[in-house]
Image (tube, rainbow, N blue to C red):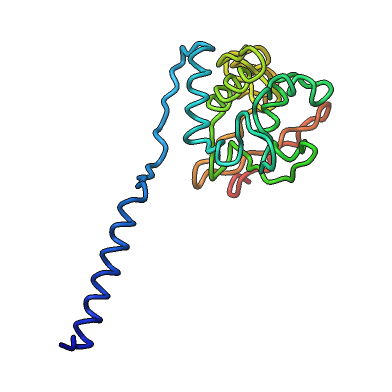
Amino acid sequence: MRVPIIVRVGALVLATTGFYAYVGQMVPQKEVQPPAEIVLRSDLTTTDMVKVGREIMEGKGLCFTCHTIGKSGALRFPDLAGVDARAKAREPGLSDVQYLAQAMYEPNAFIVPGFNPGMPVINKPPIGLNDQEILCVIAYLQTLGGAPTVTLQTSHHYYTPPGAPGAAPPGAPGAPGAPGAAPAPAAASAPGAAPSAPPAAPGRTPAPAAPAKGTR
């Protein structure tokens, strides 16, 4: 008995579809969600900041898209194992905090030998970490080869927290209303009002005003 061609084609299509459906179910499925928003409390301790910093690196910061911890060989960006120990001696005159801050705010200021530029500025889109989030990331990075010392009141070249030493207090020179600040501009004259006469020069007697029409 000869099976019609259309039946054989249909059977082949069903078999192929069933095979790929089976293979598709064998592949692990992963649902990608946007990173969860992390709310930073004002009373975070250094230990809290370390934990938050790791969460930021795994989520919003996208750090582990390119960086690794404890790997060697051909790497896209430097491995972060022991990074704090290297940060303390990487650039003369920079502490580990200053160097790590520079690496995020100004990543092209220093390129690790053997690697190419390419890291984005972390406090700008598309990543856009704020200053407090970056401090938390620095706190975590300090644990990789060192001990964390950063707090939410830590200052560096790119950020001075409000109320920290070096921050301009209210009423400082240059602030509005402070001594030495530029005076506010004079209010505009009311519509229809005559313009005011310019002030007389020092030491000169102002000329008498001309009599109005009809007074002679």
In front of the other: 6 or 96 = 6
The residue positioned 61% from the left and 13% from the top of the image is: 148
Residue 202 x/y as whole percent: 81, 27
- The extreme front residue here reads 1
Relative to 200, residue 152 above or below: above
For residue 11, what is the image quadrant?
A: bottom left
Q: Position of residue 210 (x, y in %)?
A: 68, 43
Q: Residue at x 15, y 87 (%)?
A: 1
Residue at position x 19%, y 82% in the image: 7
Instruction: Give x and y (percent) for residue 76.
Output: 66, 43
Q: Nearer the viewer, residue 69 or 131?
A: 69
Q: Specify whether 114 is left or right of 137.
A: right
* Residue in view at x 79 percent, y 25 percent: 90
Residue 5 picture quarter:
bottom left
Kindly indicate the quadrant of the structure image that contains residue 134: top right
How many numbered badges does the structure rendering display? 0
| Above or below for 50 versus 108 | above
- How far across and how far down the image is residue 35, in percent? 42, 37
